[in-house]
Amino acid sequence: MTSNRHASNQPAECGSNADLKTHFRVCRFIMETGVKLGMHSVPVATACALYHRFFQSASLRVYEPYLVAMSAIYLAGKVEEQHLRTRDIINVCHRYMHMDSEPLELNTQFWELRDSVVQCELLVLRQLNFQVSFQHPHKYLLHYLLSLKALLNRHSWSRTPVCETAWALLRDSYHGPLCVQHRPQHLALAVLCLALHAYGLEIPAGEGEWWQVFCEDVTKPIIETIISELLELYDMEAKCT
């Protein structure tokens, strides 16, 4: 998705639609700062999931979302064993908010911000009852792609970027709360179905639907619901630019 930077001191918006826009922007902030910090895809996904899970039971009127995001990045690094220095997180996030600024010096402002990140991390842990491990769709999507490659015509597969599109759709899904609202297998199948549909590829018919071979409890309405929610995120992107 395209980049558009928003500082945390922007005027507050009211209403659930405004909340969705805020969450979208903050998750974009997590993803872009994650790239600058050299985070792998799964730790970034965990940071987004922590953020979404926190705000399932917390209010934007009470908690500063960008501070929660910074703490989620810090905590995700620990959970996924890609440890990040708080100083690096603070400097990268500060530079994101204030593009022309120099790195923060080790002064009172820095230490206050560091203390806020650490205290917020403890708040997130308590709010989530220390349930901070997530089963992400990534491993399922990889398995499904490898399996489908064997089923499809080799030339059809090689001339269409289904893999790249499916991974991009999965990454973009973390801008919204899909990752904490749906089973990882279902989310992986939904982005794969959408990628296949985008390029007009069809799976050879068998006794049942091909996606039920991978996950018995998934249904067509579930897949369609997830796809619809994902497409709504792309509409949200246009409203946030």
Image: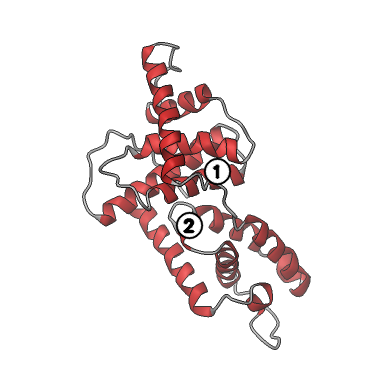
Q: Distance between the residues labelled 1 and 2?
A: 14 Å
Query: In this image, 236 relative to 179: left or right?
Result: left
Answer yes or no: do the residues labelled 1 and 2 have beta carbons within 8 Å? no
Which residue lies at the image location 29% right of the left edge and 45% below the top edge? Answer: 60
Of helix, strand and loop, which one carries label 1? Answer: helix
Residue 88 in the image: state x and y as whole percent. 52, 24
Reading the image, the residue beneath label 2 is 180
Q: Is residue 212 visible?
A: yes
Reading the image, the residue beneath label 1 is 44
Of helix, strand and loop, which one carries label 2? Answer: helix
Q: Which amino acid does label 1 sit on?
A: Val
- 105 or 61, which lies in front? 61
- Assess disc 2: are there few (<14), some (14-19) or many (≥20) residues with their C-alpha within 10 Å of its C-alpha: some
> Picture quarter containing residue 63?
top left
Relative to 234, residue 124 above or below: above
Which residue lies at the image location 55% right of the left edge and 39% below the top edge? Answer: 76
Q: Can residue 70 be seen in this view?
A: no
- Assess disc 1: are there few (<14), some (14-19) or many (≥20) residues with their C-alpha within 10 Å of its C-alpha: many
| Snapshot colouring | secondary structure
- 229 or 116, which lies in front? 116
- The image's mark for residue 14 is none
Q: What residue type is labelled 2?
A: Val
Q: Earlier in the sequence, mark 1 or mark 2?
A: 1
* Label total for image: 2
Query: In this image, 241 relative to 168: left or right?
Result: left
